[in-house]
Amino acid sequence: MAVKEKSPPSVGAEERGTSSDHADRKTLTQRLDKYASRKRKGCQIGAALCDVILVPKLGNKVLACGRYLAFRKFHETGQADLLSGNFCNQHLLCVACAAARATRLWSKWQPIIQAFPENDLYMLNLTWPPPVAKLASTAGPCDELKANIAVGIAGWGKLWGNRRKHRKGPLAGVLGAIVAMEVTRNPAGWHPHFHCIVMLPRGQRVEVVDLRGHWTKQTGGRQIRLDRIHSDKDLREVFKYSVKPEDLMENGKVDPMAVQDRYHVYQALKGKRLIRGYGTFHGVKDIVDLNAEAELSDSETGEYIDLFYRWSGSYYERVPGEGLEIKNGRVKRGKYVL
Ligand SMILES: [Zn+2]
């Protein structure tokens, strides 16, 4: 028999606000709906990790992710921003963490990139074929992907090494680059590739034919795409995700087989730096701890209220009362950990 989900109760006074800030109410309610949708998927992913892939420690982390969320709502602007939560930090498996990571990465990198308005930005996409060398018969499903990823990393290392050490090669004129690895699924298997932001002095260009020649020599890859970046939307693509959250879904539900498949990608990528900065962008840390308190924009000042929400099992419900705090992923009321 189908289980009927409880409907969320109507929003409380603080969330509802006055009739003049209708947009505000909509913003917070819509945000909560999005987080709830991700949380439902997270529960299914966590269950598959526990029951199908038999990794209960990891599965329980994903299951517990986003049990509590805190938003800071500014009275004057009506803006409500996510302040903190108890995230599992497993963005390769957890859809809530993938979305939260994308937001954090963008707010971290956007001011760094935009500090150089005098330069030109290009989007460079680099792909390569899987290596032909046979792996040992004992190799696991993620070893093939690891070997494939290693080809791309070595290829980029060579290209950038020429620019850094000798000021030579097709990237010689590049001032800085941000390289993000993405792994997509296609019928032939896993397909790792790079999305790069490349910064050049105004008017300078990268010779695509030369770049393709070097890339093919290093990796066997022939597909290179270089486009001028015109908007923040183009830039954000680079920080969106490392593996597509939608790949886990089948007919609107999480597919346990897709989670199993994704688990191999998780094994191949975990602990790797998936976004790296070079040249001007060197040294910017890419590891994002989602449980560190968000740095809210300077433009949001004035009186605010912090609103806490708890996962009820089917929606986020307001946690009333004072004294609640979420710090470094731990939810506390006074000295008690919830
Ligand atoms: Zn998570």
Image: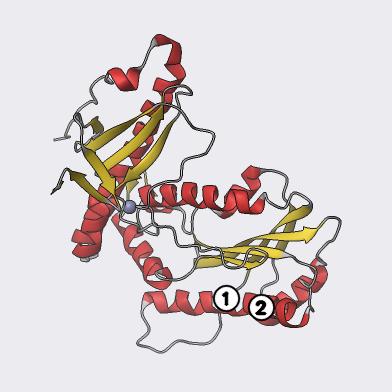
Identify the mark at residue 220; answer none if there is no mark: 2
Q: Mark 1 points at which residue?
A: 153
Residue lying furthest right: 203
Element carrying mark 2: loop
Q: Eyeballing the image, is 148 above or below 248?
A: below
- Residue 66 makes an appearance in the image: no
Residue lying furthest front: 302
Q: Eyeballing the image, is 45 above or below 216?
A: above
Q: Where is residue 32 in the image (x, y as percent from the top left)?
A: 34, 33
Q: Distance between the residues labelled 2 and 1?
A: 13 Å
Along the viewing direction, whichever of 18 and 207 lies nearer the viewer: 18
Along the viewing direction, whichever of 228 and 74 lies nearer the viewer: 74
Along the viewing direction, whichever of 96 and 225 lies nearer the viewer: 96
Q: Where is residue 12 in the image (x, y as percent from the top left)?
A: 26, 20
Q: Eyeballing the image, is 321 above or below 132?
A: above
Q: Where is residue 280 in the image (x, y as percent from the top left)?
A: 68, 64
Q: Does the beta carbon at disc 2 come under 8 Å from ligand 1?
A: no
- Residue drawn 36% across and 16% down? 17
Q: Eyeballing the image, is 34 above or below 85?
A: above
Q: Is residue 322 left or right of residue 307?
A: left
- Residue drawn 78% across and 60% down? 200
Residue lying furthest bottom: 136
Q: In the rendered image, which quarter is residue 162 located in?
A: bottom right
Residue type for callout 2: Gly
- Residue 115 makes an appearance in the image: yes
